[in-house]
Image (tube, grey):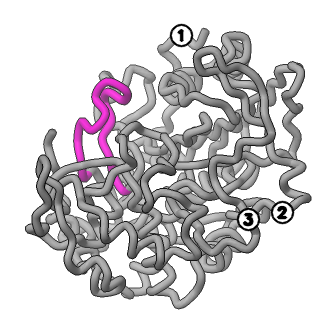
Amino acid sequence: MRSSATRAFAPFVALLLLTGIAAAQSSAQTETQFAPDFAEKLTMLQDALIENEVTGSNVVLVGRDGEIVHRSVRNSGRRGDRDITEETLFPIWSMSKPITIVAMMTLHEKGLFDWNDPVSKYIPCFADLTVREGDTVRPAKTPLRVIDLMTHRSGYSYYPVVPGIPPRHDHPQQSQTKFKDLQEFCEAAADHPLDFDPGTDFRYGINQAILGRLVEVLSGRPFGTYLEEAIFEPLGMSETSFVLDQERRERFQPLWINIGDLKGYTNLLDELNYDPDSKAHFGGEGLVSNPADYAKFCEMLANNGDFRGRRIVSPQSIEAIRTVHSEDVFPELMPGVDMGFSVFVITDPEADGTHAPRGVFGWSGYHNTHFFVDPDTNAWAVFMSRSREFNGTIPPRLRAAVYGDRSTN
C-alpha cells in the first residue's frame, strides 16, 4: 500500500489559495457528457437490482448545474415492502461521513484547528494511545492527529475491516446504545489498542465518531446541533437527523434482507440507536435522510461549496476533500480509485471502467445507498435503497449507467 501527501497537505492548500484552483476552473469549461441513454440505463439497473433480489424498492436522482435532470423510483410491489414517496426516510449509514467531513471543513475555515494538531489537544483522553503487535501492546510511536481521523489513517478499525459494515456490537467501543454521549465513546475508544501507529497506514474505521466529538469541543455545540446550524438549515435539509420519533419512524423504509437462508422484509431491525433522547450521535453512520435532502448536499459539493447563493464551505475545502491521501486501499472492490477525506476519488478512469471522469468523488452506505459528485462539471447522482447485504457492484454500475460503458443488467 502506498501513502501520499498527507504531510504535504498544508502547502497544497496554500497553493490553492494563491491560484484560485485555476486548473479546476479550466476543466469545468469542458463539460463531461452523460450517456445519451443514461435515464434508460438507470431504470434498467434499478429493475435488475429488484428482480435479482439485491434491493427492494429503490430511487435514483441525477443533477447537473443546480437542477435535477432525472428522478426515478422503482417499487418492488412485494409483500412487506413499501412504495417510496417524497416522504420516505432511509438510514444512510456511511454517507453520514462526508457530512461530518464538511462540518470539520467549516471549523477549519474558521481557524479553530490545524490538520496536524494532536487530537489530545482537544480530547485529552487520546494522549497516551497504545498499538497492538501480535499478542502484545506497546505505546504508540506517533500521536493521533486530526488529519489521521479525516483520512482513516488513525489505526482504528471497524473490527473486522469491511467497507460499509456497521459497528460491531461485541466490541465495547462500537455499541451506540452503550454510551450516554460522544465523550464517553471517545474514552472507551482511547482505551482500545490501535491496529498501527497513527498516520502510517490506512484502515477504514470509527474515525468520524471521534470527529463528532471534536466538532462538539471546537464549536461548543452538541454535534447534531452544529450539523443543523452549519449544514442542514442552510441547505434546507429538514429531513436529515440522527433521530427517529414516532412520526418519522412510520416513514422509515423497511429493510430487505437477502443473506443465505434469510430473506424478507422487516421493520424491526434498526441496528443503530435513533432514540430522540440519545446524545451518542455517530458521525460515521448515524444519520437518517431522504433522497431530496441528500441531493441538496450533493448539489452543494458539486457547486464547489455553494448552494444557491449560500456558501457552506469554500472551493478550496471541496478540493481538499478530494485530495488523495491513500492509494489502492480497496483494489479489488474499487479499482482505479483512491481515498481523500473519507471519500473515494477516481484517479484512474480506465481502471475504474465506468467512463466517469478523473476527480469524481463520493461514498456509499451499508444499506446500499450511494452518491457521487463531479465539481468539475457540476454534476452528481444519489441512489437510495434499504437492503442487506452490502453490494459493492452498485456504485460502479450506477456511474456506468450515467456515463456509459458498463452493462447494467
Pick the residue in front: 389 or 4. Answer: 389
Query: Is residue 29 left or right of 298 when viewed as pictured?
Result: left
Q: Kindly report the distance in space between the C-alpha atoms of the residues bearing marks 1 and 2.
A: 41 Å
From the image, tell me which residue sits under label 3.
275
> Considering only vertical position in the picture, is 328 above or below 90?
above
Residue 154 appears in the rendering: yes
Bounds of the magenta span? 325-341
- Residue drawn at the location 8% of the way across and 68% of the way down: 141
Residue under pointer 2: 245
Please tell me how crowded label 1 is: few (under 14), some (14-19), or many (20+) other residues with Cα within 10 Å: few
Where residue 286 sits: x, y (%)? Answer: 60, 58
Identified by mark 2, the residue type is Asp
Q: To which residue does mark 1 refer?
A: 407
Q: Nearer the viewer, mark 1 or mark 2?
A: 2
Element carrying mark 2: loop
Position of the C terminus, as image quadrant, is top right
Q: Earlier in the sequence, mark 3 or mark 2?
A: 2
Element type at mark 1: loop
Q: Earlier in the sequence, mark 1 or mark 2?
A: 2
- Magenta stretch, overall SS: loop
